Amino acid sequence: MGQEETTTVIENGGLTNDTEVFTSQGKMTIERMFKDPYAASRVYCRNDNGDLVIRAFRAVYHTGKKPVVRLTLDNGMTLKCTEDQKIYTKNRGVVMAKDLTNEDDIITTDDYKRK
């Protein structure tokens, strides 16, 4: 897909500035969180077991231009991220975005709404 300006919320991987994340205040873009670090106090994320949890928001860091991949899911949702972004799948656990295959079943927030 080429290189885009990306930021990251965690120490490895990265999401593009226009990525929306779920926060305690609703959906918010990475760019807004970078510009206003007090806009969201808590974010939904995965713990080491892959469980969806809400944690205190730390910081967003600009990481410059990096190769970006676009993932299009069966539900029509798209995600742009760096190749080293961790993606949680039902069938293989944590997989780097660059290593995903068409057989991987990516876990989304929709999976939690159905429970």
Image: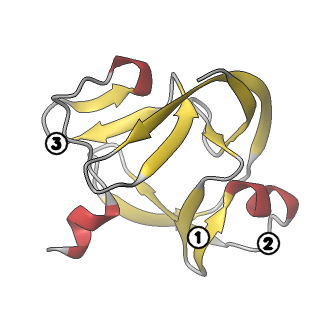
- CA gap between label 1 and label 2 equals 10 Å
Residue for point 31% across, 40% down: 88
Q: Which of the two labelled residues, at mark 3 and mark 2, occupies the earlier sequence position? A: 2
Is 96 situated above or below 40?
Answer: above
Type of residue at label 2? Tyr
Is 102 situated above or below 74?
Answer: above
Relative to 11, is 33 on the left or the right? right
Q: Nearer the viewer, mark 3 or mark 1?
A: 3
In the rendering, which numbered label is found on residue 42?
Answer: 1
Q: Which residue is mark 2?
A: 38
Report the front residue among 115 and 57. 115
Q: Which residue is mark 3?
A: 90
Q: How is the image coloured?
A: secondary structure
Q: Count neighbours of disc 3 (C-alpha within 10 A) and say few if under 14, some if 14 to 19, many if 20 or more.
A: few
How many numbered discs?
3
Residue for point 24% across, 74% down: 113
- CA gap between label 3 and label 1 equals 25 Å
Type of residue at label 1? Arg
Is 29 situated above or below 62?
Answer: below
Report the front residue among 75 and 105. 75
Report the front residue among 45 and 35. 35
Type of residue at label 3? Lys
Q: Position of residue 108 (x, y in %)?
A: 31, 56
Secondary element type, mark 1: strand
Residue for point 73% across, 30% down: 4
